[in-house]
């Protein structure tokens, strides 16, 4: 099932996993082998969906890809840096530099306005110069140039998610990691979010999206299916659906 | 994470929970205020005691007669007071130049005083000519009696300020005559009484000095020592006290040793332990009193400290709640790159801001309390001292409490695992 031969001849992979394992312990007795030897390469400018039923290990894979957790075994290099053995603070620095998170529940800080939320990665690292201007620029890029001083509670779900995407973009990370980004949105907003991802991808951003909805995954250019802690299926999408066209046609993504 | 961001974030979260922040701060405010006020009371009491002692005259060495304590060695008849004016004159001549002033006193008891139709009852004391110099007590009118007036048992008197007012009102007392009268055989009916009346000419009035330990010092009449001895009391050649004013505080120890030795020789006593007098150094008295008031201050400070401790526990409690409530925020911050020390700093700064601000307000409140207490207790002349030291310690302690009681909650926050924190509902 290797895709190596069919991938475009790009340089080094952004994500390079070999034999990655992760075991959780629930209580004293039960061990959950969430990942049982995952091999995965993701190259720059890819738009990948990671799918799988619950318990397949896709959430664990997501956490490890995002450096929120360290693998028990195997190797993981992210943007050329070996991150498998790093401690908490070093992982925090990697997340700050290389990973832009987009979550299902948006995860914005309710007390901060849009600009302050978007600025957050720059508070903890990166180039701090002109951070306000950059935050405003990122918000304009996701179409929220007129909402920069709004608090999350004053924004719709789709708008909140766009703020989260602007935040993910701010440190110019190696990849955007989206965990069910449309899970809490109506179909119209979902289509808008997917359109933003497709546009960013077209501009050269690497986007990895965990989803369980085939309709959402159909917008990606590659689908990785997890089952029982390993990559069970890895395929390119011949002709990904275009979210912008669907919006124009008045059809929300994910409409059954 | 820049310090500026930490402070902004800390202040923001304090402002969001205004009521909670205010209530938590109240604990620290009350704690700091009570430390400030309590220590101020202690310091004030200490200063007042010191001022009172020094108002009796500074750098004083007092010699008092002492009854023999060993009853088997001395018969009852020899327990008489042993100090004389000659003792005083001897010290005066031997230590001339190395002391500032010296005087001897004999209390003459309370007398009925009449003048110009008014009647008064007050204390009369026989003293020698250097009394004003020893007691740092100037005259507001007239003059004090001289050594020659002592020699001739002159019937002259110097009045305390309030005595003069009681007897003469606003009129000038100097030059007036007063009568001291003593009534004998009282209790057997008016006809059984006989009165002794002695005339005195008022030659001076002392400046007012206020009260000492609740007693007015301005209600008294001073007469020459010899006049008191020979005319008023009949106790010739006995004095109740010899008071020496040393040159300065440093020379007091040497001077009191000299006085002691001169009197030992004059009284022909070889064993210092059986001396028939005692020499009291004002410095020793001050030191003893300072120890007492120091302990008092410490005790009051400790009471305030306990409320500060309770305030600190309140801080810890609320910080634990805050960390719990903001678990998700901590997860988000960690996801975008906050390291442990960033989270630790954020929550520590929050608790220090809480206690620091509380401390500052506490100082204001404590100071206001001292102002109110001073107004209310104005008659006690109690001045409450809020010293720079107290303020610095109070601020330091409240910031310290923020760190100590904020550290555990902040560490709990810093140690949260990002995944668990993000999943927290």
Image (tube, rainbow, N blue to C red):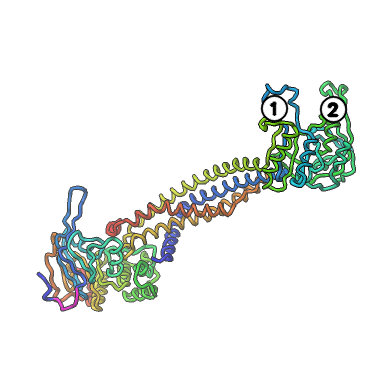
Task: Write down the residue under mark 2.
Answer: B183
Q: Is residue B408 magenta?
A: no
**Residue A50: image location, x then y, percent:** 18, 66
Does any portion of residue A182 appear in the rendered image? no
Question: Between A197 and B41, which is closer to the camera in this rendering?
Answer: B41
Tell me the number on the disc at residue B68.
1
Q: Quadrant of the N terminus of chain B?
A: bottom left
Which chain contains the residue that carries disc 2? B
Classified by dominant secondary structure, the portion drawn in magenta counts as loop
Q: Earlier in the sequence, mark 2 or mark 1?
A: 1
Left or right of B174 in this view: A148: left
Asked which secondary structure carries label 2, the reply is strand
Give, as a single range, the part of the protein colored magenta: A7-12
**Residue A89: image location, x then y, percent:** 31, 62
**Residue B409: image location, x then y, percent:** 38, 53
Which chain contains the residue that carries disc 1? B
- Answer yes or no: are tags 2 and 1 on the same subunit: yes
- Tell me the residue at 80%/43% (across/down): B130
Asked which secondary structure carries label 1, the reply is loop
Q: Quadrant of the C terminus of chain B?
A: bottom left
- Tell me the residue at 54%/50% (across/down): B33
Q: Which callout, 2 or 1, points to the residue nearer the camera?
A: 1
B186 shown above or below A119:
above
| Mark 2 surroundings within 10 Å by alpha-carbon count, few (fewer than 14), some (14 through 19), many (20 or more) | few
Tell me the number on the disc at residue B413.
none
Question: Between A199 and B352, which is closer to the camera in this rendering?
Answer: B352
Left or right of A134 in this view: A204: left
Does any portion of residue A234 appear in the rendered image? yes
Question: Between B218 and B60, which is closer to the camera in this rendering?
Answer: B60
């Amino acid at each position: 099932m290797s895709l190596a031969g069919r991938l475009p001849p790009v340089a080094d992979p952004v994500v390079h996993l070999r034999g990655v394992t992760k075991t959780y312990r629930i209580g004293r007795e039960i061990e959950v082998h969430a990942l049982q030897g995952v091999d995965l390469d993701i190259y720059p400018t890819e738009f990948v969906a990671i799918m799988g039923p619950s318990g397949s290990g896709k959430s664990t894979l997501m956490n490890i890809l995002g450096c929120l957790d360290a693998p028990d075994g195997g190797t993981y290099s992210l943007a050329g840096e070996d991150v498998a053995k790093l401690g908490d603070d070093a992982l925090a620095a990697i997340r700050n530099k290389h990973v832009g998170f987009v979550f299902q529940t948006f995860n914005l800080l309710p007390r901060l306005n849009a600009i302050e939320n978007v600025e957050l990665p720059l508070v903890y690292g990166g180039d701090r110069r002109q951070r306000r201007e950059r935050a405003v620029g990122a918000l304009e890029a996701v179409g929220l140039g007129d909402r920069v001083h709004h608090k999350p509670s004053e924004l719709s779900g789709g708008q909140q998610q766009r703020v989260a995407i602007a935040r993910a973009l701010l440190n110019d990370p190696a990849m955007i990691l989206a965990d069910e980004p449309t899970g809490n949105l109506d179909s119209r907003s979902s289509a808008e979010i997917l359109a933003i991802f497709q546009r960013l991808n077209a501009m050269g951003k690497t986007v990895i999206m965990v989803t369980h909805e085939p309709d959402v995954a159909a917008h990606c250019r590659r689908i990785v299916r997890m089952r029982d802690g390993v990559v069970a299926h890895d395929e390119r999408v011949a002709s990904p659906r275009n979210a912008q066209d669907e919006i124009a046609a008045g059809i929300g993504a994910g409409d059954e | 994470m820049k310090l500026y961001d930490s402070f902004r974030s800390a202040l923001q979260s304090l402002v969001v929970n205004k009521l909670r922040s205010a209530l938590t701060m109240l604990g620290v405010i009350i704690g700091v205020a009570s430390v400030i006020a309590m220590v101020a009371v202690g310091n004030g009491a200490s200063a007042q005691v010191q001022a009172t002692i020094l108002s009796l005259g500074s750098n004083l060495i007092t010699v008092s007669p002492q009854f023999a304590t060993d009853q088997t060695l001395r018969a009852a008849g020899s327990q008489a007071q042993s100090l004389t004016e000659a003792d005083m004159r001897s010290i005066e001549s031997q230590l001339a130049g190395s002391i500032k002033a010296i005087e001897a006193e004999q209390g003459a008891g309370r007398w009925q005083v009449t003048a110009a139709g008014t009647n008064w009852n007050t204390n009369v004391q026989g003293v020698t000519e250097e009394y004003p110099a020893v007691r740092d007590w100037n005259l507001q009118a007239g003059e004090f009696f001289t050594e020659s007036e002592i020699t001739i048992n002159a019937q002259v008197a110097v009045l305390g300020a309030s005595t003069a007012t009681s007897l003469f009102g606003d009129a000038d007392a100097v030059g007036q005559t007063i009568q001291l009268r003593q009534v004998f055989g009282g209790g057997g009916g008016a006809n059984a009484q006989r009165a002794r009346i002695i005339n005195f000419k008022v030659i001076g009035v002392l400046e007012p000095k206020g009260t000492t330990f609740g007693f007015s010092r301005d209600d008294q009449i001073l007469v020459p020592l010899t006049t008191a001895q020979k005319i008023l009391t009949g106790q010739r050649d006995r004095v109740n006290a010899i008071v020496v004013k040393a040159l300065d505080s440093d020379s007091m120890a040497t001077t009191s040793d000299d006085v002691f030795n001169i009197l030992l020789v004059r009284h022909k006593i070889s064993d210092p332990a059986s001396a028939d007098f005692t020499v009291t150094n004002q410095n020793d008295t001050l030191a003893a009193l300072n120890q007492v008031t120091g302990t008092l201050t410490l005790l009051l400070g400790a009471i305030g400290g306990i409320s500060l401790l309770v305030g600190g526990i309140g801080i810890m409690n609320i910080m634990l709640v805050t960390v719990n409530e903001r678990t998700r925020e901590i997860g988000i911050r960690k996801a975008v790159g906050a390291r442990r020390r960033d989270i630790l700093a954020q929550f520590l700064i929050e608790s220090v801001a809480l206690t620091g601000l509380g401390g500052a307000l506490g100082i204001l409140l404590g100071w206001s309390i001292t102002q109110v207490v001073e107004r209310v207790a104005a008659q006690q002349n109690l001045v409450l001292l809020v010293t720079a030291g107290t303020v610095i310690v109070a601020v330091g302690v409240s910031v310290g409490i923020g760190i100590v009681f904020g550290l555990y909650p902040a560490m709990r926050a810093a140690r949260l695992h990002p995944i668990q924190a993000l999943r927290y509902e």
